[in-house]
Amino acid sequence: MVQKAVTSLIRTLTTLSARDEWSSDPVVQKLQGMIQQSRLVSIDGLAAQVKLKEIYEARELIGKSQIAYEVYKAFGNQAQMEAAHQQAEEARQKLKAMGVSEIQYQSGKDLSGYYKQTAIKACDYDPTITDRSVPLLEKEEYALLLRMAMEPGGSEGDRAAEEDVLVHLTGRGAGPAV
């Protein structure tokens, strides 16, 4: 069972890497080569697999942080914007320590496409609450309202109705208007 899961992971990583712009990075190429040569028969192959997975996870975390930053920015949540930026910087440091070329993840490079969830799911904390960190509710209705609130336009009446629903769903206000 474990071998089947690992084999599946290898196929997934190999498929992703073949279509990935990061496959030109020397560290990624070396790891991919080790994985293809070993096919689960060596500790080096398994270690390469783990390291490659860590690289892709760090890249996805940067993308997630970039998206979260923009969501927090839309709601004027400066503290969470800074936290998202710090999270991306930590992931960049991890990639640097792993030897990945900085051109792949340098500050300002858009990696948001590697995060495959919605923008709201990129946020760990409620973007509407700016005076403290409150975990984001896992209610789809609330996520929909947040997405609607981020869209440009909308009347004051729409915003007031959204706030009424937010209070009903959460028992708390939407925070300051943006």
Image (cartoon, rainbow, N blue to C red):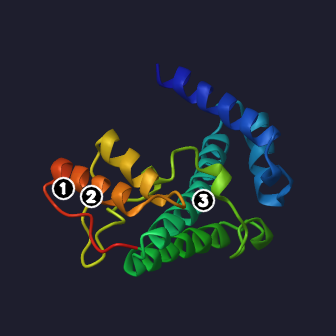
**Residue drawn at 71 percent across, 74 percent down:** 108
Badges 3 and 2: C-beta atoms under 8 Å apart?
no
Foreground tag (3 vs 2):
2
Which residue is tagged 2? 163
Which residue is tagged 3? 63
Foreground tag (3 vs 1):
1
- 2 and 41: which is toward the camera: 2
| Residue 130 in sight here | yes
Q: Position of residue 163 (x, y in %)?
A: 27, 58
Distance between mark 1 and mark 2 Cα atoms = 6 Å
Distance between mark 3 and mark 1 Cα atoms = 31 Å
Q: Would you call the spot at circle 3 few (<14 residues within 10 Å), some (14-19), or many (20 or more)?
A: many
- Helix, strand or loop at disc 1? helix
Is 124 located above or below residue 52 in the figure?
below
**Residue drawn at 45 percent across, 80 percent down:** 82
Q: Amino acid at mark 1?
A: Val
Disc ID at residue 65: none
- Helix, strand or loop at disc 3? helix
Q: Position of residue 62 (x, y in %)?
A: 58, 63
Horizontal relation, residue 44 to residue 171: left or right: right
Horizontal relation, residue 144 to residue 65: left or right: left
Q: Amino acid at mark 3?
A: Gly
Disc ID at residue 167: 1
Badges 1 and 2: C-beta atoms under 8 Å apart?
yes
Horizontal relation, residue 167 to residue 53: left or right: left
Which image quadrant for residue 9? Answer: top right
Badges 3 and 1: C-beta atoms under 8 Å apart?
no
Which image quadrant for residue 26? Answer: bottom right
Of mark 3 and mark 2, the one earlier in the sequence is 3
**Residue drawn at 47 percent across, 58 percent down:** 154
The residue sitting at the right extreme is: 24
Q: Amino acid at mark 2?
A: Glu
